[in-house]
Amino acid sequence: MREYSIKILGLGTLLVLSTMLADWMSNKVVVPVDAYIGLVYLVLIFLSLRYYVSKASVSNPNQWVRRAMTSSMLRLLGVLTFLLITLLNRGKADLVFASAYCVYFLLFLLFEMSEKRSNLRPDSNNGPQKENA
């Protein structure tokens, strides 16, 4: 959990710095403050849901799968709720905020999928060799 926290905070910091640099370099496009708040929100939601899944007292693998699926649904619900509330509060559609927030979400989701994929991949060096393999 500690390694994941460091990686997700590093990714969030990298995205904040790259957004600030793009905002500073661009004369035509201004990144709203809501994009930075959304980025912090994404870091917090990904950390809290990872904590929800990893700190569970799981007696069988099916419970872990159920928790992982529940966390995926909660993540999507939380992300869409934040996006909807922010867009409704702004009064007008802000394409810069919406596109930045969606790109941030996709990058965090790719990071999460790569972490889960590496955790699910079996270690080929451990265990007995299969006869038919």
Image (spheres, rainbow, N blue to C red):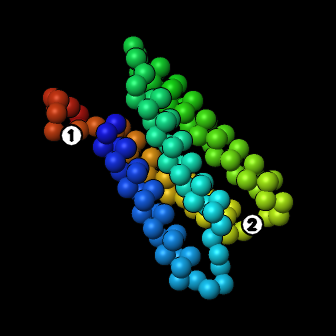
User: Relative to 44, is 54 on the left or the right?
Assistant: left
Which quadrant: the N terminus? top left
Residue 17 at x, y percent in the picture: 45, 67
Q: Is residue 118 above or below residue 99?
A: above
Residue that numbered label 1 is attached to? 124
| Amino acid tagged 2 | Asp
Q: Residues within 10 Å of mark 1 (few under 14, many from 20)?
A: few
Tell which residue pokes out farthest to the right in this image.
91
Tell which residue pokes out farthest to the top in this image.
59
At x 49%, y 53%, the residue is 108
Any part of residue 132 in sight: yes
Q: Is residue 21 above or below residue 66?
A: below
At x 57%, y 30%, the residue is 70
| Amino acid tagged 1 | Ser
Find residue 94 and name its label: 2
Residue 31 at x, y percent in the picture: 63, 70
Q: Residues within 10 Å of mark 2 (few under 14, many from 20)?
A: few
At x 52%, y 69%, the residue is 19
The one nearer the camera, 61 or 9, is 9
User: Relative to 95, is 6 on the left or the right?
Assistant: left
Q: Quadrant of residue 55?
A: top left
Q: Secondary structure at mark 2?
A: loop
